[in-house]
Amino acid sequence: MVRIAITGKGGVGKTTIAGVLSRLLAREGKDVLAVDADPDLNLGSILGVEVTDVTPVAEKKEFIAERTGTSAGGDTASGVFKLNPKVDDVVEKFGIPTPDGVNLILMGTVDEGGTGCMCPASAFLRALLRHLARGEKDAIVLDMEAGIEHLGRGTADSVDKIIIVVEPGQKSINTARRIKELASDIGVNDFAGVINKVRDSEKEKVVRNKLKELDISVLGVLPYDESFVDADLEGNSPIEYSEKSKGIKSIEEVKNKIFRN
């Protein structure tokens, strides 16, 4: 099994990469689970399904309360709740079939009110991620929330590789630096950068050099692809809108490198 977390600053294109990567892997015959752990919950549309009426697992308060032994509001007067709740049936209960056979789970996120806080919902999601990481899928692709918050909650220790998506811009580079530092702190040392939305070789060179200074290897480079924008405007999946576009081909090259290493 390969467990891949895709992260980066908001708006860099990580959800598009996660969705296309998942479908490309499934087309090879792999059993793929895609996990939407971003509060915007856009992975479904990239995979080709409508999920606007689906409640993410993180917001199923009564279900989480039952599993963690707390009130439906997620609070407990004693401060005691199960740190290892039953989660082995979550994908079976809430998994969503998508095109090419990818199974999608809308996990969502939890506002913990502080980086040091551990609430029942957070404990449940952490247990779920760890269970998924020990599952029988050939590949798990996690679309993580923008920035670094998920790493601070300790969920990234359930992944093998962290892909940090960056675009030309210092804010994106700064986020990559913080992600790498936090990933190293929790023991994840297999990370690489993917440079997205590249319009010319000069900008690519600048970003490559900045990532090199951070000791982040570059796994791949994706050109700015207008077909991704057009697909989004039409409410279509990028891989269905133009499966031979330069952006799709570049993500396929990234996939090949991941499974070659």
Image: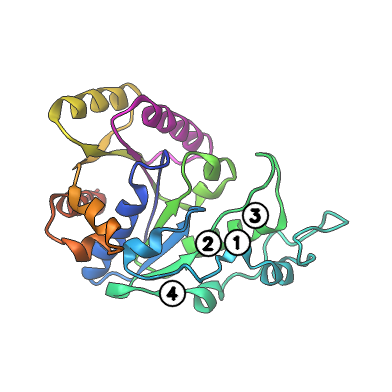
Mark 4 residue type: Ile
- The residue that label 4 is drawn on is 96
Secondary structure category for the residue under label 2? loop
Earlier residue among tags 3 and 2: 2
Secondary structure category for the residue under label 4? strand
Earlier residue among tags 2 and 1: 1
- How packed is label 4: few (under 14 Cα within 10 Å), some, or many (20 or more)? some
Using the image as rendered, state which of residue 97 and residue 55 is in the foreground.
55
- The residue that label 3 is drawn on is 122
Mark 2 residue type: Met
Colouring scheme, one of rainbow, by chain, secondary structure, one colour: rainbow
Looking at this view, name the residue that lies furthest to the bottom: 93
Mark-to-mark CA distance, 1 and 4: 15 Å
Using the image as rendered, state which of residue 50 and residue 210 is in the foreground.
50
Mark 4 near mark 3, Cβ–Cβ under 8 Å? Answer: no
Secondary structure category for the residue under label 1? helix
Magenta stretch encompasses residue 177? yes
Give the number of the disc on residue 58.
1
Say left or right for 60 vs 246. right
Task: Tell me: residue 199, above or below residue 88.
Answer: above
Say left or right for 157 vs 171. right
Earlier residue among tags 3 and 1: 1
Q: Residue at x 60, y 69 (%)?
A: 87
